[in-house]
Amino acid sequence: LLLMLWQAIQLFRNYQHKHLIFTILFGALTIMSHPQTALHAALAGLLIFLFYSLHKRGTIFAILVGLGVAMLSSPWWLTVLSRHGIEPFISAGQTSQRTLESYLSIFRFDGLGDYLFIPTLLLTFLGIYLSFKQKKLFLY
């Protein structure tokens, strides 16, 4: 996943074909080796696209990445679908502890169950605010 995201950042910065090929390769390998991370890879790729290249060339490269990952990984997921049906993919999606509910729990204040939660949350929001104020959308 990290290699795919790194290559996606390089792709949307430089628009070189080698980064396109590596983004597709690492994206397909991520999906085939860890199907539960497919949603994470897609959402992170979408965020990188939104932050780096909201124009025609970036859109074309993003579509090419999506099609390339789908084509490169399709023999694997078509085989799984034909032999086992949709159940393995549903099970893979439920194995991760990082569900949408866990991400949204940050914004709910259910109480002071963890005494370090509030200071950590405040420092997180302060860091996000300062990053956006300085127009630094990524940490590097």
Image (tube, grey):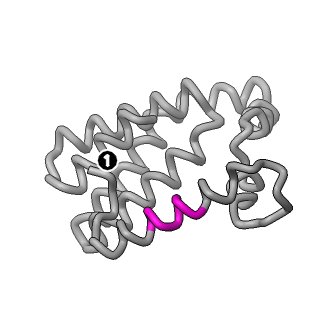
Left or right of residue 84, residue 47 in this image:
left
Toward which corner of the image does residue 84 lie, by quadrant?
top right
Q: Which residues are magenta?
A: 122-128
Which residue occupies the foreground of this view, 12 or 18? 12
* Disc 1 element: helix
Chief secondary structure of the magenta portion: helix
Q: Image point 47% across, 52% down: which residue?
A: 44
**Quadrant of the rendered image containing residue 23:** top left
Q: Amino acid at mark 1?
A: Ala
Position of residue 51 measured from the top left corner of the image (x, y, whole percent): 34, 66
Q: Is residue 126 magenta?
A: yes
Q: Which residue is mark 1?
A: 8
46 lies above or below 77: below
Q: Nearer the viewer, residue 15 or 138?
A: 138
Q: Which quadrant holds the N terminus?
A: top left
Give the vertical position of 109 relative to 91 (above or below): below
Residue 109 location (% of width, % of height): 79, 65
Horizontal side of 81 relative to 130 (left or right) equals right
Q: Position of residue 15 (x, y in %)?
A: 16, 53
